Amino acid sequence: ELNEEVVDYSAFMELIKLGMMVEKVVYTREDRKIWSWNESLAKWESRVERMKDNPEYIHVSVGDYFWQMHARTIQESEWEAHRIRLSWNEVKARVADKRFDAEAANYIRNWWETQRTPLEEVTDDQIGVEPSPMVEFEFFEAYFRYPIDIAEEEMPIDETDNIQTSVGSVPTALRAIIHKDARKMMTIKYNTFPLGLSPFEVCSYVGRPQSVMGIGVGHMTMTYQIEITAMHQQRIDSGTVRNANAYKYKADSRVPSELPLRPGSGIPVDEMEDLEPFAVGSGFDSSIEAENQALQILQERIGFRDMALDEAAMAKAPATTTMALLAEKGRRLDNVLRSIRRFKKRLALKAMLLYKAYYP
């Protein structure tokens, strides 16, 4: 019910390729109206059933997750934001259940009117100015961790010694949904997540010091892939040049300037020496060895060869070398797995807190 299997596939693909994955823990309650036929009364009856009442994981794409770029860890960032897309129907539904401010939604609709083309303006004036139910609007669900200054009389009293603490700032967790283009805040309130925690969790593939973003396989292989691709294209171009022939012919011959060449075709000439083929260029030496060497370095860079060591080569190596290779063989993989286990542990902890707080 946590939706973990569906979320993990997309999240792990981003973790491996981009070096970072983000998941969000939310508590979902979903009620549906179900119609059934009553035989005794000979009519249709409706009833409301609760389909969901549990926490679940949501995959947040790296491109839709924002934080303070100067923060060295996600805990140092004073805010986190998730870009979400809601249809106009979903916006109106949130206004109806008081999750969105009605005045803010009307402001969004007025902003939408300014973005229409002249043709859309003419069409919409005929049917009423209202966004299509499926028109999507881009919002940012932001979580802030800002200190709020409070007055001295509002400061809490320490129960142990009954002495009022000094005046200062209290760190407060806030949650807001903002439409950035219209510069309008749809809602803002205190973060109701248990213990004021953020619902987001971040995991990196290979961590980098002083950085939230990790290093993925895509980043590791980019320079080597460019090198291998360039050499591969040169080898193809070399074969093309080697197999491309041109023709030279006497100026006073009747050979046409453009020869229609095809298998089995003939070319009329006055003398056999009037037409002579020659190669456009000389072939380049094969670059397959250089490609394989770059590929080998690439595999060592991403740790692939750590898991695929040649047992025959290891058998001929000294004992100390073999022990060192075996120790290094799984170190990088163990670090990645350890990071994922800690990430899953933090997600499970937040799911349990939501169970405790909201489960009936």
Image (cartoon, helix red, strand yellow):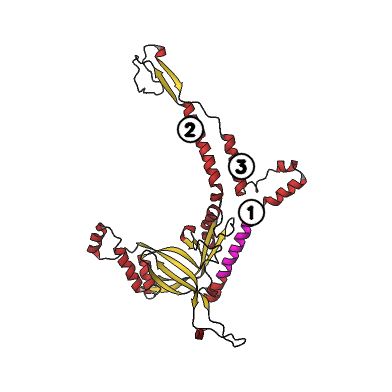
The part of the image, by quadrant, that contains residue 107 is bottom left
Residue 237 is labelled as 2
Image point (46%, 68%), residue name: 142
SS at badge 2: helix
- Left or right: where does residue 210 sit relative to residue 260? right
Q: Can you tell which of label 1 and label 2 is closer to the viewer?
A: 2
Image point (59%, 35%), residue name: 289
Cβ–Cβ below 8 Å for labels 3 and 2?
Answer: no
Please provide the residue range marked out in magenta.
331-350
Q: How far apart in space, not on screen, are marks 1 and 2 (Cα)?
A: 39 Å
Amino acid under disc 2? Asp
Above or below residue 11? Residue 146 is below
Above or below residue 354? Residue 246 is above
Say which residue label 1 marks: 333
The part of the image, by quadrant, that contains residue 354 is bottom right
SS at badge 3: helix
Q: How far apart in space, not on screen, are marks 3 and 2 (Cα)?
A: 24 Å
Amino acid under disc 3? Gln
Q: Earlier in the sequence, mark 1 or mark 2?
A: 2
Decide which of 127, 172 is in the foreground and name it: 172
Q: Is residue 80 visible?
A: yes
Residue 296 is labelled as 3
